[in-house]
Amino acid sequence: MSPRNSIIFIEALTKKFGSLAAVDDISMAVKPGEIVGFVGPNGAGKTTTISMILGFISASSGSIRLFGDSVSLQNAHTHHMQMGYVAGDMSLLNNLTGQQYLTHMAALTRANSARQKELIEALDPVLGKKLKTLSRGNKQKIALIAALQHSPKLLVLDEPTSGLDPLMQEVFLHLIKNEANEGATIFMSSHILTEVTSICSRVLF
């Protein structure tokens, strides 16, 4: 598959920290509309790869393209409006309430208020308290709503159900399937194999 026909296109990607190769010469392509699982043991380089896709850190060598365009530290922000990102250890603006945070993120991404309301009803987070006082599960629900509320073309998810109870994990998987049915592409890292195999059209190890 060529870069022009891929949402994510990675070629010979390597990231070294000193003598340690955290990511070693990987290549992959993710097509529009796919739900792709990204699987490996702890320390395999999944989060490092995702950080490079998002432009948070630079590669030592190799290349990444999103939506056909090269990714660098300088231009990564130009892709973020089309993306939603959630991590299992996501840092939020802890002095804001849940609703204030979602309103802030909605303004940045020009999110649809009706879509935000649908997601709040589905995930049922605590919104009236400051984020720093909330449980990990409630923070994760709010992070998921913030990532989904602008209906992004690409969702990049790194252990997205961390902290969610089994019922909310099922709600999340249902939401992700709906996003894919609406044309979104999902790239999801998870250590829960049953979760990956239940929704992913393809798995990368």
Image: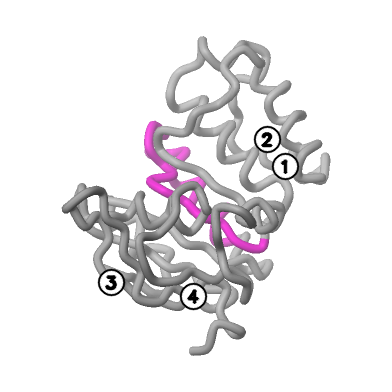
Whether pointer 3 and pointer 4 mark residues with C-beta atoms closer than 8 Å, the reply is no
* Circle nearer the N terminus (3, 4): 4
First in sequence: mark 2 or mark 3?
A: 3
For the residue labelled by badge 3, is the local secondary structure a helix, a strand or a loop?
Answer: strand
Q: How much space separates mark 4 and mark 1, taking CA atoms?
A: 32 Å
Q: Is residue 46 left or right of residue 174?
A: left
Instruction: Find out whether the residues at labels 2 and 1 contact each other: C-beta distance under 8 Å.
Output: yes
Query: Which amino acid, by three-letter code, is at mark 2?
Result: Glu
Q: Residue placed farthest to the front in the image?
A: 18
Mark-to-mark CA distance, 2 and 3: 43 Å
Could you tell me if the residues under marks 4 and 1 are in contact, i.e. CB atoms within 8 Å?
Answer: no
Q: Which residue is label 2 attached to?
A: 121
| Residue type at numbered disc 1 | Glu
Residue at mark 1: 118
Q: On residue 25, which mark appears?
A: 3
Q: Nearer the viewer, mark 2 or mark 4?
A: 4
Q: Three-letter amino acid code at disc 4?
A: Phe
